[in-house]
Amino acid sequence: MMFVVAGTRHGKLIDMRVQYNLDAAMYLENAPPLVVLTTTVLGGFRGLIADVLWLRISHLQAKGDYFEVVQLADWVTKLEPWNTEIWSFHAWNMTYNISVIMAEEEDRWRWVYNGIQLLRDEGLLYNPGDSELYREVGWIFLHKIGAPIDEMHQYYKTMWAKEMTDLLGGGRPDLRNLSDSVRQRMEKDYKLIPEIMLELESKYGALDWRTPQAHAAYWTYRGLKLAEPGSASASRCELMLRQSIRYMPEDK
């Protein structure tokens, strides 16, 4: 009898899981097959597996085995795509640890940009409302590319400027009158939304979009728009937004 009663409540429980965002599978509409497999078939076991992998990652990180860390971190993101900590760690390892091992500037830049793409194209896909991940993308632009902390920082700046020149035709495009093809490429390949770029410029003046500081400001601004007003995340975003604008290169 108790099983019959429990069965009649099953549908209501499912509706409540959806209402309160407790069902991870509901977010997997556009996910890769491997992510769907790990988050649905493994069920609760994926958390246990992820914990074991985290322990292994910590051990390898201490030994400096960064390349193996990349593989394990990638597995953890597949197991727990809503764990923002692993996305940040994974991107940091690529951008700061592995890049500096590379001798050739092209290889260094590839790993730096891999970190940006990881957060921008994958981490934010599963965590679109997390203000801190937006700020993390901005930090890579501001600190790793924009600041002279890496001996090859000027090469990074040059490569990014070439990307944006190819995309926008220059540093100060007419964002109100973009062609459909340029707009589509901006939004699909770079996750740049012209309306948000215009919002930013209305507050701080015209920006040179070839510079990493402009993109640091853009991503941090998007994070600030999502952060709870008065929260620690909002304060961090506001501070970094001011830094991004402050360190904007002067027009040549």
Image (cartoon, helix red, strand yellow):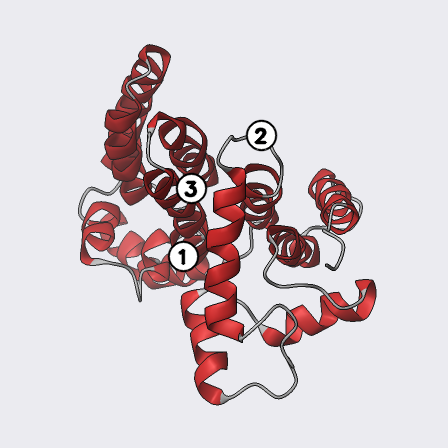
- Name the mark nearer the viewer: 2 or 3: 2
User: Closest to the observer: 108 or 28?
Assistant: 108
Is any part of residue 191 visible from this angle?
no
Q: Secondary structure at mark 1?
A: helix
Residue that mark 2 sits on: 149
| Corner quadrant of residue 101 | top left
Identified at 62% across, 68% down, the residue is: 171
Query: Mark number for residue 121?
Result: 1
- Circle nearer the viewer, 1 or 3: 3
| Element assignment for label 3 | helix
For residue 140, above or below residue 31: above
Q: Position of residue 214 (x, y in %)?
A: 65, 57
Q: Amino acid at mark 2?
A: Ile
Residue bearing the label numbered 3: 112
Q: Position of residue 240 (x, y in %)?
A: 72, 43
User: Residue shown at 38%/35% (left/top)?
Assistant: 94
Check disc 1: other Cα within 10 Å, few if <14, some if 14-19, many if 20+.
Answer: some
Q: Is residue 8 visible?
A: yes
